[in-house]
Image: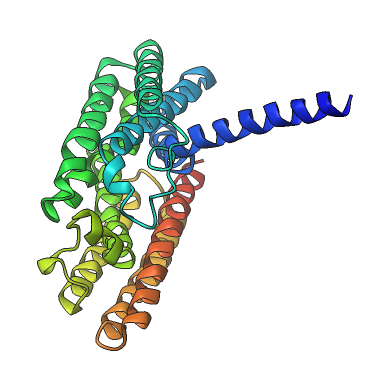
Amino acid sequence: MIVQSAHNVSIWSLVWNKAKAYGELLKFRLSFLVAFSSAFGYLLGIQGTFFWIPFIMLCLGGFLISGASVTINQIIERDLDALMTRTKARPLPSGRISVKEAIWVAMVTALAGFILLIQFTNPLTVLLSLVSLLLYSFVYTPLKRVGPIAVFVGAIPGALPPLLGWIAATGVISYEAVVLFGIQFIWQFPHFWAIAWVSHEDYQKAGFKLLPSGGQKDFQTAIQIMIYTLFLLPMGLLPAKLGLTGINSALVASVCGALFLAQTFKLMRNCLEEEQKSRRSALQIMFGSFVYLPVVQIAFILDKI
């Protein structure tokens, strides 16, 4: 009985570890944020009767396609990931998942995601979802070793989820959809560059060149981060200006934008001092970016409701 019990525990442990590895491969939190942003765009775009099934299938399809994209990214970069401290424990470089398994995961999740979007959305949503996957996996990924142009290219698929949600709800690309895309597009520059600042030494091991202004952690880069964050202030007011949302969400966006911007001034000051202080400031910007986007998007949704 004891042997049997130990055997069962061992099997469940193996199953759990494999499921955990697959969750890491699909980058569950990142893919969930993609699904959330798609839901955000859909909820702002929907007019009239709300149907749960298309909404849920849009979110699930977005999650699966995002998971496929990041899996392809990890397949391509598996040897580079093994060089970096922050990524060497990922499923592929650590050997917890084989390349063959990862390829199957990418194919199955991509196929399932596109089937759901084809069945429950519209052709334009499907087409732009395909563009997003291709841009992220096969253009952004290799460009990371070329230069900071990779951040611009990567920001396009990164900003598409709210646009896709809007199109799934309305069937068209309108100026409101472009504004939602623009907010998330601009947001990604301080977000990406803060991560690149914090992980600069690690990125150098893999040959990644993501920081602007010569690729250095200096005052010029800090200014670039500040400028793009500054643009979020007027961008956050546009939904209210266009009548998409109201004054309450405009106030939330303004406060969040001002707090986010204040963090960049701190980086500008600390980058002229000691390295450790500037790294802490960049880390604060990175976490600030994680807070800014969902808080502002939730405020927009609640304001419409």
| View extreme (bottom): residue | 273
Residue 104 showing in the rendered view? yes
Q: Residue at x 43, y 54 (%)?
A: 296
Indicate how the structure is coloured in the image: rainbow
Q: Residue at x 31, y 16 (%)?
A: 122
| View extreme (top): residue | 119
Q: Nearer the viewer, residue 50 or 31?
A: 31
Q: Position of residue 179 (x, y in %)?
A: 26, 45
Relative vertical location of residue 239 with respect to residue 122 in this rendering, above or below: below
Q: Residue at x 51, y 36 (%)?
A: 21
Q: Position of residue 76 (x, y in %)?
A: 25, 36
Give the tally of numbered discs: 0
Relative vertical location of residue 235 with respect to residue 124 in this rendering, above or below: below
Q: Nearer the viewer, residue 8 or 118?
A: 8
Q: Quadrant of the N terminus?
A: top right
Horizontal side of 226 relative to 258 (left or right) equals left
| View extreme (front): residue | 3
Relative vertical location of residue 280 with respect to residue 25 in this rendering, above or below: below
**Rendered image quadrant of residue 168:** top left
Q: Position of residue 115 (x, y in %)?
A: 37, 13
Q: Residue at x 31, y 78 (%)?
A: 267
Relative vertical location of residue 245 with respect to residue 123 in this rendering, above or below: below
